[in-house]
Amino acid sequence: AAGVIQSPRHLIKEKRETATLKCYPIPRHDTVYWYQQGPGQDPQFLISFYEKMQSDKGSIPDRFSAQQFSDYHSELNMSSLELGDSALYFCASSTTGGLDTQYFGPGTRLTVL
Amino acid sequence: DQQVKQNSPSLSVQEGRISILNCDYTNSMFDYFLWYKKYPAEGPTFLISISSIKDKNEDGRFTVFLNKSAKHLSLHIVPSQPGDSAVYFCAYPAGGTSYGKLTFGQGTILTVHP
């Protein structure tokens, strides 16, 4: 069965650079969630989209923005990167506006040097 | 403020025995919980869920028990297999039923020895 696809899988950036992470949900899933997992921590919710509209927002820095496109894929844009942004970024998708289990992608490991 | 807590950072079990992973929550209004398993360098994988209208849900080797009065849930894995070695997270959805952003516990590292 098709799963959530995230790209790139690994990304290395310098401080103050920008990064774009992409997420392709499972076909027919209309809701996308973004989570950040720091070293030794549990995943923390950042932001979610349903039918291309932001549906919820968590502890996402103002330096970060995200959107969901007409094909339901989503992109997380991160600017003015800081060392503390180094983390695993997971995307999850679900159906029916989220009225279903969330299925996670493999994650993007971002390293900021 | 951690609203779901997994107080055991790690658990070591012999193959074939039972693994019991625990999770406590603070808000008695929470009425739906999920367990996810996570291998290194992979995303969390959904295992099993439970609604507060039940006190038990079973799926193969995995059973989740919910004790609402104690605000406690546990995941039982029987029999444990080496491939079960992973980090296990309990989580609840903000939507209160099955939807919405997930809040995770700190995770428990399960190691199953052959």
Image (cartoon, coloured by chain):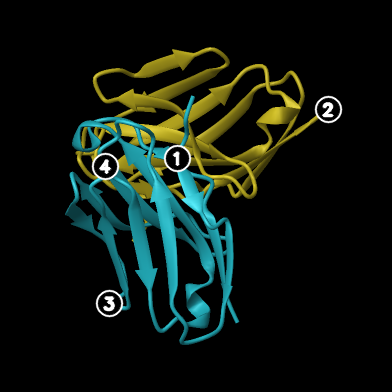
Give the residue at mark 2.
Answer: B114
Q: Nearer the viewer, residue B95 or B9?
A: B95
Residue at 39% from the left image edge and 41% from the top image edge: B91
Q: Which residue is mark 1?
A: A4
Query: How far apart are the two marked residues, 4 and 3, measured between alpha carbons?
Result: 22 Å
User: Which numbered dot is residue A31?
Assistant: 4
Q: Are marks 4 and 1 on the same chain?
A: yes
* Most foreground residue, B28 or B33: B33
- Report the residue marked by disc 3: A62
Of badges 3 and 2, the one in the foreground is 3
Disc 3, disc 2: CB below 8 Å? Answer: no
Secondary element under disc 1, as helix, strand or loop, is: loop
Q: Amino acid at mark 3?
A: Asp
10 Å crowding of disc 2: few (<14), some (14-19), many (20+): few
- For label 4, the SS is strand
Q: How far across and down, in percent of the image, does residue B19 sit?
A: 63, 27
Task: Name the amino acid type tagged 4.
Answer: Thr
Q: Mark 1: few, some, or many residues within 10 Å (few <14, many ≥20)? A: many
Task: Mark 4 or mark 3: name the one nearer the start of the chain.
Answer: 4
User: Considering the numbered disc 2 on the image, is that residue within a helix, a strand or a loop?
Assistant: loop
Residue visible at 47% across and 34% down? A3
Q: Colour of chain B?
A: yellow
Q: CA distance from mark 1 to mark 3?
A: 26 Å
- The chain letter for the residue carrying disc 3 is A
Q: Judging from the image, what is the letter of the chain drawn in cyan?
A: A
Residue situated furthest front in the rendering? A71
Indicate the chain on which mark 2 is placed: B
Residue B51 in the image: state x and y as whole percent.
29, 24
Residue B21 coordinates in the image, percent (x, y) = 55, 34
Q: CA distance from mark 4 to mark 1?
A: 12 Å
Can residue A76 be seen in the rendering of this structure? yes
